[in-house]
Amino acid sequence: IFQHRVMLHHKDKSTSNIPSPHKLTDHHNCWHGVSTIAAQFDKYLQQLGKTPLDRDELSNLLDTLPTPDVRINHNPLKVFIYTIEQLEDTNTTRRTHFERDLQHFMGLTSPFDDFSSQAKSNVNKVTYPEYIDICQPEFDSLRKSLVKEGKKSSEWIVNQFVMAEDVVVSDVEYFREKLRAWGEDPCSVVREK
């Protein structure tokens, strides 16, 4: 998301300074929603009230997010949760099943167009000097922190959130597989290739 915010910064011709990603490590040091704290997706999902929170989870939620941002309200609506990989799945059978599940969840009578064939509006071929390569050694500590938070978030989501009665997942095993990758260093995979 850092790259996307940098692109928007240049597109909007903003004159403010883009902070170093090394400084975006807590809710006090956040830039347009970018920080390692913002990567803790479990904290935002916990506020939907779909799962009970024990004392430690509640304490961690309150300690992690700025207090004015924490609102735990049981949302009576069902939640359909998915990963980007499900939208771009090259396995036609699985992707078509996902598209049908989403269509049914939304109560639509017409099927979706093939998601994988849709033009991507947020793909930018221009690069900016502030873009980073997270696999470079100078970002090792930042990446390690993101992977640690990704692992915690994915474990809570796959072990608790998707088990909630009001949460709908298409192909829960594929979803879990993709979320578990949040706890793996993406650069170790790149280096192995």
Image: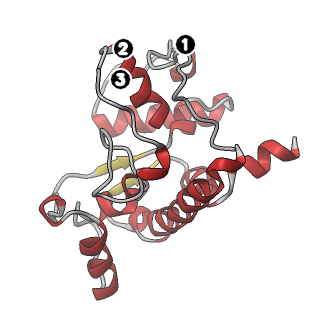
Q: In this view, does 179 lie to the left or right of 59?
A: right
Answer yes or no: is residue 17 visible: yes
Q: How is the image coloured?
A: secondary structure
At mark 1, the secondary structure is: loop
Answer yes or no: is residue 111 visible: no
Callout 2, which amino acid?
A: Lys
State the image coordinates of residue 149 (x, y, percent, origin top left).
50, 63
Q: Badge 3 is on which residue?
A: 9
Seen from the viewer's position, the closer of residues 193 and 2 is 2
Q: In which quarter of the image is residue 41?
A: bottom left
Between the C-alphas of marks 1 and 3, the distance is 13 Å
Q: Give the vertical position of 149 relative to 22 (above or below).
A: below
State the image coordinates of residue 131 (x, y, percent, origin top left).
55, 29
* Residue at point 83%, 45% (across, down): 191
* Residue at point 62%, 32% (across, down): 89
Q: Is residue 168 left or right of residue 58?
A: right
For the residues bearing labels 1 and 3, Cβ distance under 8 angstroms: no
- Residue 24: numbered disc: none
State the image coordinates of residue 124 (x, y, percent, origin top left).
52, 16
Callout 3, which amino acid?
A: His
At mark 3, the secondary structure is: helix
Seen from the viewer's position, the closer of residues 40 and 63 is 63
Q: Give the vertical position of 21 relative to 91 (above or below).
A: below
Graded by Cα atoms within 10 Å as few (under 14), some (14 to 19) or many (20 or more), the crowding at tag 2 reads few
Q: Give the vertical position of 76 relative to 101 (above or below).
A: below
Classify the position of the C terminus by image quarter.
Answer: top right
Q: Badge 2 is on which residue?
A: 11
- Residue 126: numbered disc: 1
Q: In this view, does 49 lie to the left or right of 2?
A: left
